Amino acid sequence: MRNLYAILITTVIAMVTALGFCDAKADVQACVITVKDQAWVKGEKVCLKDIASTKGPAPQQERLGAIYLCCAPKPGMEKILRGTWIEAKVRSKRWLPENTVLRTPEIVRIGRTSQSIQEESFLRLYTGYISRQLKGRRSDFGVSRFKVINNGPLPEGDVRVELMNQAEGKLIGHVSLGGIIRVDGKIEQRVVLSGWVDRFEKVVCTAHRLQRHTLLAKDDLCLKRRNIAKLPANVIKAVEAVVGKRLKHTVKADAVLLANSVEKPPLIERGDRVTIIAESPTLMVTAIGTAQDRGSAGDQIRIKNCMSKKEIIARVVDASTVKVEF
């Protein structure tokens, strides 16, 4: 009897001890998750750790925090999740302890942190690109009417901008550059930088008023700095290119000379009598003709053969000679 009583006492003690151990174990493993009603995320994914605080064993906190919820909103934007949806998402994990406490608000607002590139920074990139292409002659150009197309919020991270002249056009007048924006090496945005580029170069101008058909000499000309973005493409930039040519029309002092405003002085005038030369490697024939056009050296003009009365095309050699190729 005494032995039976001892066995009973021992069994009761063992059961009490076991129950106490289980309760202690349950208390140790219990986790409390408190979801915030508003949170900001940096990356492209939203995990539980981004929107909630967790109390409990460290390994359990780490596993709970890694639960993926959804994609993050775009930079500068926000996404709204319902608390009941979050709770269902978390409790769907089979490994979640039954005694986990989950506290969620009715809705959770999730925002995405962002950064932006100011227009002034884009302008520096734009002018820097043009300066490099023009070999550093910063004082020789100016930029106006600048704007950025498709500039928007960017994810946080290391930003790099790559510019390119997509149209491969001249960097003068209206210039548009394409831009690729990378954040941490990933392409995030494409922009267009547009502006008006004034370019300043020395061009040939008249030193004083000059009459039509004036044969140009160095004293008649000078080089002056002008905005070539507002001048025709055929502006003349070297004095040597026009010395000895004549003006097609009267020009005022300080006028910018264009290629179509000058011409070679004609060696032959209409009606002049000339010698026509026609030659081959083994034969040369000459005849007298009358010029039907004016022409300078190298010009092709019409000549009327005085004997045959036929018109031919000949090249001006000098003031009295034209040549027929055959």
Image: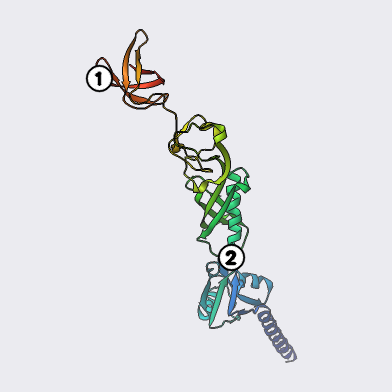
Question: Is residue 316 positioned above or below 229 on the image?
Answer: above
Q: Residue furthest top?
A: 282
Query: Residue 208 in the image: x percent, y percent?
Result: 54, 40
Q: Earlier in the sequence, mark 2 or mark 1?
A: 2
Q: Is residue 102 found left or right of 252 in the rendered image?
A: right
Q: Is residue 238 visible?
A: no
Q: Is residue 121 visible?
A: yes
**Which image quadrant is residue 300 in?**
top left
Question: Is residue 228 positioned above or below 94 on the image?
Answer: above
Query: Residue 111 in the image: x percent, y percent?
Result: 56, 72
Query: Residue 35 in the image: x percent, y percent?
Result: 59, 79
Which structural element holds mark 2?
Answer: loop
What's the mark number on residue 310? Answer: 1
Nearest to the observer: residue 287 or residue 80: 287
Label 2 crowd bin: few (<14), some (14–19), many (20+), radius 10 Å:
some
| Residue designated by label 2 | 43
Question: Is residue 19 positioned above or below 324 on the image?
Answer: below
- Nearer mark to the viewer, of 2 and 1: 1
Going 53% across and 73% down the picture, which residue do you hit?
78
Label 1 crowd bin: few (<14), some (14–19), many (20+), radius 10 Å:
few
Q: Amino acid at mark 2?
A: Gly
